Image (cartoon, rainbow, N blue to C red):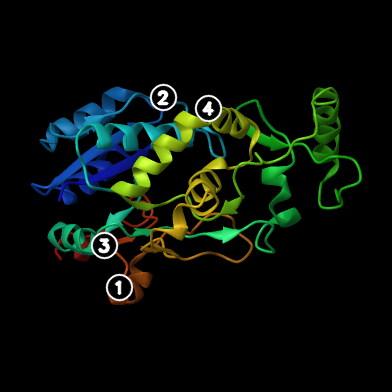
Amino acid sequence: MKLAIVVLAHDGPDQLALLLSSLRHPQVRVYLHLDRRSELASFTKALGDAGLDEVELLPRHATAWGSADLVDAALEGLSQGVRDGCDYFALISGQDFPLRPMGEIHAFFERAGSGSYLEHFPLPTTRWRFGGRDRTDFYTYTVVGRRETCIPRGEDTSFLNRKGRLLNGMLRVRGALKPTRHFPDYVTPFGGSQWWNLSRAAADHVLDFIDKHPDYRRYHAHTLAPDEVFFQSILLGSGFAAEHEIVNDTLRFMRWSEKDSHPRVLTTEDLPAILASESLFARKFDTSVDGAVLTPLRER
């Protein structure tokens, strides 16, 4: 069984080299996406110094948070892994780290067979603002490098400050002539975490679905954080899950701060929980904040 691991990275070349070194295994292929806005030379040096010549660099996109370029980067890795004959696929970030030796991780996915692991829940949902309609029904634009969602008239904007209300007014003008936005009617919307673990059957289904529905990717150009909707909707909302097992689990250890939309940086204080976890990977780490936390993980 050949395992493909797709890594999305944008900073921390030395930390990235530690991660990629930990992924080495004779039956593991690593596909690396580096944000196009990051300076390449420092990454090339770090990977070269670590002897990571076997890592395949994917075509680069400017993967701003919440943009469809993150989906494109993940699809690049998925497509290349399929072309290379891989049997299972995992998407991780450059700030992740494995919690098991790669032999154990490879064996886990080999046992998974045609089953996949990714978080999923139907939309609308109470987990997300507006029930998730800001993902499916509202237009999101890139404004000075940031993703900004236009809240239509009649919706609650009381949480916006003065600057936010002004920006939202400008976005309403920008989209005044656009048609009402609806999720494609040939698929049911689902949401979940960006990070997935997919069988070959799931990977083939995703790529075949996109070939048959090229407008699906175009629709997500205006989706807020489409990487949290794109794959779930294809796999859970198009009939695939009726015939294939999809376990509602990312296999990632993460901790969240209250009212924060991003997982917090893990430190040595989290080590007891990390080491006791049955997850395959943990995120996120930042060696500029706490590098010592990785030492016991590298020794496992």
Residue at 36% x, 38% y is 9
Looking at the image, residue 1 sits to the left or right of residue 154; the answer is left
Give the residue at mark 2: 36
Q: Position of residue 253 (x, y in %)?
A: 38, 65
Whichever of callouts 4 and 3 sits on the residue coming sooner in the sequence is: 3
Residue at 40% x, 30% y is 35
Q: Is residue 181 above or below residue 231?
A: above
Residue situated in front as seen by the camera: 28 or 244: 244
Give the residue at mark 1: 278
The disc labelled 3 sits on which kind of residue? Ala
Q: Position of residue 283 (x, y in %)?
A: 38, 57
Circle nearer the viewer, 3 or 2: 3
Residue at 69% x, 57% y is 124
Rounded to the nearest angstrom, the CA distance separating label 1 from label 4 is: 38 Å
Whichever of callouts 3 and 1 sits on the residue coming sooner in the sequence is: 3
The disc labelled 1 sits on which kind of residue? Glu
The disc labelled 2 sits on which kind of residue? Arg
Whichever of callouts 2 and 1 sits on the residue coming sooner in the sequence is: 2
Rounded to the nearest angstrom, the CA distance separating label 3 from label 1 is: 15 Å
Rounded to the nearest angstrom, the CA distance separating label 4 from label 2 is: 24 Å
Element type at marker 4? helix
Q: Position of residue 30 (x, y in %)?
A: 22, 40
Q: Position of residue 281 (x, y in %)?
A: 31, 60
Whichever of callouts 3 and 2 sits on the residue coming sooner in the sequence is: 2
Circle nearer the viewer, 1 or 4: 4
Looking at the image, residue 216 sits to the left or right of residue 161; the answer is left
Element type at marker 1? loop
Give the residue at mark 4: 214
